[in-house]
């Protein structure tokens, strides 16, 4: 676990997240090329994330390891430890397995046969909430999320997420910063939440348009 106040570690986590986000932006157009001709299950978020993580690992640009599908130990009803959920990927920080920069990835604006589903509610409920409850990044000051916008309408996806954030009763939203979008760049925005344990966690979001 982190020593001292998690807030004291926030600048270090922000610096690391900035580096990961920049590497993600650089890798994104090329790392998913093998998936662009595929359909169905191959464009599920897990396959997309696998290709993205592989590209990040190859950069060798981080002071830690990029670990996909990072397993978390949790106690069951009998107080026995077992592998519970898995974080999409993490950047390890030092030798403590409980200290890491976590990233959870979700698809948005997914076209189906009859309609396109925004999945903004699911992004919040099944992704962001896990940081607030402490299921992921327990006791840590910062985490990141990536939204794969499958119809490339990143501005529309962002607007739907803004509404989902305001409507959610489970994320203890304290503040949200939505900088103006920059042409040709992923959309970035930042939210701060009060965790179930009492401390704040900042979550930094990146929305990537499927080419």
Image: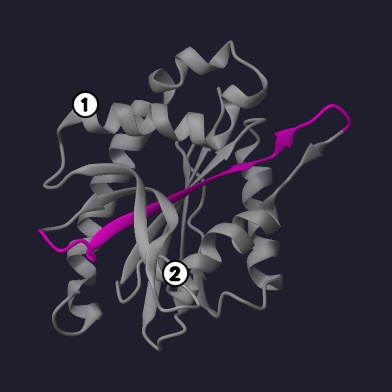
Q: Is residue 2 visible?
A: yes
Q: Residue furthest right?
A: 114
Q: Which residues are magenta?
A: 95-114
Query: In what quadrant of the picture does the C terminus appear?
Result: top right
Of pointers 1 and 2, the one earlier in the residue sequence: 1
Residue with the mark numbered 1: 58
Tell me the residue at 70%/49% (across/down): 119
Tell me the residue at 40%/26% (across/down): 51
Q: How many marks?
A: 2
The location of residue 130, given as percent across then percent down, is 50, 66
- Vertical comparison of 63 with 128: above or below: above
The location of residue 12, given as percent across then percent down, is 17, 63
> Left or right: 95 with respect to 24?
left
Secondary structure at numbered mark 1:
helix
Q: Residues within 10 Å of mark 2 (few under 14, many from 20)?
A: some
| Quadrant of residue 25 within the rendered picture | top left
The location of residue 153, given as percent across then percent down, is 66, 35
Residue with the mark numbered 2: 135
Tell me the residue at 15%/84% (across/down): 4
> Left or right: 144 with respect to 44?
left
């Amino acid at each position: 676990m982190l020593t001292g106040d998690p807030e004291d570690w926030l600048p270090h986590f922000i610096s690391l997240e900035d580096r990961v986000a920049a590497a993600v932006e650089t890798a994104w157009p090329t790392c998913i090329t093998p998936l662009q001709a595929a359909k169905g299950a191959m464009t599920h978020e897990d396959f997309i994330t696998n290709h993205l993580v592989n590209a990040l690992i190859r950069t060798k640009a981080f002071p830690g390891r990029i670990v996909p599908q990072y397993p978390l130990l949790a106690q069951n009803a009998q107080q026995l430890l077992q592998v519970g959920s898995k974080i999409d990927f993490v950047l390890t920080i030092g030798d403590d397995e409980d200290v890491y920069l976590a990233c959870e990835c979700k698809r948005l604006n997914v076209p189906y046969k009859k309609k396109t589903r925004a999945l903004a509610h699911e992004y919040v409920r099944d992704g962001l909430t896990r940081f607030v409850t402490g299921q992921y990044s327990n006791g840590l000051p910062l985490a990141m999320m990536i939204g794969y916008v499958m119809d490339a309408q990143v501005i529309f996806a962002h607007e739907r997420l803004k509404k989902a954030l305001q409507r959610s009763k489970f994320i203890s939203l304290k503040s949200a910063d939505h900088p103006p979008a920059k042409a040709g760049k992923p959309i970035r925005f930042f939210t701060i939440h009060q965790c179930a344990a009492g401390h704040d966690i900042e979550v930094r979001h990146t929305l990537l348009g499927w080419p």
